[in-house]
Image: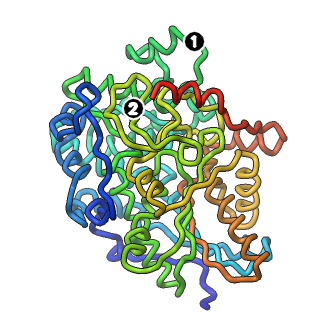
């Protein structure tokens, strides 16, 4: 084994295609449905809020899609991202396991989100759109789209989930620096927001509510489209640059992963690392692939695989996915980007067919692992990413108990520099663990 612990790629090794898994699926996915007619969704149904080139990618039969040159030029600002071997963490755990992590926090926005934000802004600019409206949970997606819109000369409106708007003011300020307008959601800026405020004036908000506001904004302004940071197929597609790079870097390290891990909210960073390895599993035996979500919002592990709306106001198409019910409002955990009632239909499909696994954790053990990681490897992780770290640590401890070497690869999807209030709560012993919100979920599931 090499003594190297950092694996870097040249600009010439940045992927120039996105990998599309749709034509390789063993079973076809259930189609999205028109919310009015309940008929399978047609491309023209999405035309009022998405540019046609993204709609084509949503349903594309092509195994690879070329990345436009203008997008590649911006990717080179931070891609390729580094792969590290966490040798100091391995030593602290006294494990024979080798722990690798793909670090997406080197992007200007501090997470993996610009991989799709840049692409979406580019295609909307080509379509003549003047403004994009979106939602954001913890603010990573809102930051990424604010940057991408600025780079392509678009205006940007962000509906930020209220609890994160209050918890994470510096991400909001970052969006302002890049020229976006940011509203706490639910807001009085839309009918959807006003309806929630009338019923629940102190609502902490949810991604489902914020999506409703952004979709309504886009649908009621002719110069505006909607942009989504997770869940949809074209977003999963754009993120596959992560896994393509990781495979080359693992070859440089001389090892193949036995398990691939990512945190899971809507599915984007997890899919970005996992999907190229899912394709490997179709042609040969590859790694186990594990999605890790919060116990307070356990769509994959406790949800139902069913058709449901992606938003609270029922403005989106009906998607076949693991869901807790579109009315479910998760507790105000610090991993705001993982507080989504549903899940990517593509990743839900893979879970339903046993091609990936899922598990959940409460937030305190995740912060335990995040602090241990920061004290050994030096990087302060985003609370979302801490879920992947927790699972990686547990895999390494299992390897220690078994006395067997295991190669672990996880996605460190972003840094936690704007989440210091969360870490302060943890270090002061004030962090609250939320029990599985069974009654709230049962109530929301009744509306599916």
Residue 201 bears which disc, if any?
1
Q: Residue furthest right?
A: 429
The C terminus appears in which quarter of the rendering? Answer: top left
Q: Residues within 10 Å of mark 2 (few under 14, many from 20)?
A: many
Residue at 32% of width from left, 76% of height from top?
12
Query: Element at badge 2?
Result: strand
**Residue 118 in sight from this viewpoint:** no
Q: Nearer the viewer, residue 316 or 411?
A: 316
Q: SS of the residue at dot 1?
A: loop
10 Å crowding of disc 1: few (<14), some (14-19), many (20+): few
Residue 262 drawn at (x, y percent): 55, 59
Residue at coordinates 61% horizontally, 72% vertically from top-left? 408
Mark linked to residue 23: none
Q: Quadrant of residue 302?
A: top right
Residue at point 23% right, 27% down? 37
Question: Position of 4 compared to 153: left or right?
Answer: right
Q: Is tag 2's residue or tag 1's residue first in the polypeptide sequence?
A: 1
Q: Quadrant of residue 279?
A: bottom left
Q: Find residue 34 and report its horizontal and vertical position in percent.
A: 25, 32
Front label number (2 vs 1): 2
Relative vertical location of residue 443 with respect to residue 76 in this rendering, above or below: above
Up/down of 172 relative to 140, above or below: above
For image coordinates 39% across by 26% down, the residue present is 212
Q: Is residue 154 above or below residue 403?
A: above
Residue picked out by circle 2: 309
Quadrant assignment for the N terminus: bottom right
State which quadrant residue 195 falls in.
top left
Q: Is residue 266 visible?
A: yes
User: Can you give x and y, in whole percent of width and height, for residue 383 in the image?
Assistant: 63, 48
């Amino acid at each position: 084994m090499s003594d190297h612990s950092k694996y870097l790629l040249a600009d010439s090794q940045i992927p120039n295609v996105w990998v599309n898994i749709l034509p390789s699926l063993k079973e076809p996915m259930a189609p999205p449905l028109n919310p009015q007619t309940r008929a399978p969704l047609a491309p023209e149904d999405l035309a009022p809020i998405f540019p046609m080139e993204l709609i084509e990618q949503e349903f594309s039969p092509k195994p690879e899609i070329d990345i436009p040159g203008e997008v590649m030029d911006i990717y080179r600002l931070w891609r390729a991202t580094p792969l590290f071997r966490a040798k100091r963490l391995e030593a602290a755990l006294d494990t024979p396991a080798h722990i690798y992590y793909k670090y997406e926090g080197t992007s200007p926005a501090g997470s993996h989100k610009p991989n799709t934000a840049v692409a979406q802004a580019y295609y909307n600019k080509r379509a003549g759109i003047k403004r994009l409206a979106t939602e954001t949970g913890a603010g990573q997606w809102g930051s990424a789209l604010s940057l991408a819109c600025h780079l392509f000369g678009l205006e940007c409106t962000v509906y930020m989930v209220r609890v994160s708007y209050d918890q994470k003011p510096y991400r909001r300020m970052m969006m302002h620096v890049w020229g976006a307008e940011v509203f706490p959601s639910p807001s009085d800026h839309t009918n959807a927001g006003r309806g929630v405020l009338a019923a629940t004036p102190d609502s902490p908000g949810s991604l489902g509510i914020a999506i409703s506001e952004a979709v309504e904004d886009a649908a009621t302004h002719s110069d505006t489209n909607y942009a989504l940071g997770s869940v949809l197929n074209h977003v999963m597609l754009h993120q596959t640059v992560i896994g393509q790079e990781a495979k080359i870097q693992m070859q440089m390290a001389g090892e193949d992963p036995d398990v691939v891990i990512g945190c899971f909210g809507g599915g984007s960073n997890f899919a970005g690392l996992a999907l190229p390895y899912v394709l490997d599993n179709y042609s040969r035996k590859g790694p186990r692939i594990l999605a890790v979500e919060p116990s307070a919002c356990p769509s994959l592990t406790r949800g139902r695989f069913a058709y449901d709306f992606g938003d609270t106001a029922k403005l989106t198409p009906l998607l076949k996915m693991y869901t807790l019910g579109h009315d479910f409002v998760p507790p105000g955990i610090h991993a705001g980007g993982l507080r989504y009632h549903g899940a990517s239909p593509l990743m839900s499909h893979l879970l339903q067919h046993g091609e990936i696994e899922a598990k959940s954790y409460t937030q305190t053990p995740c912060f335990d692992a995040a602090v241990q990681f920061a004290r050994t490897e030096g990087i302060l992780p985003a609370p979302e990413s801490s879920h992947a770290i927790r699972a990686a640590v547990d895999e390494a401890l299992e390897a220690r108990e078994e006395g067997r070497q295991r190669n672990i690869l996880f996605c460190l999807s972003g840094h936690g520099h704007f989440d210091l209030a969360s870490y302060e709560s943890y270090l002061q012993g004030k962090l609250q663990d939320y029990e599985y919100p069974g009654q709230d979920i049962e109530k929301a599931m009744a509306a599916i």
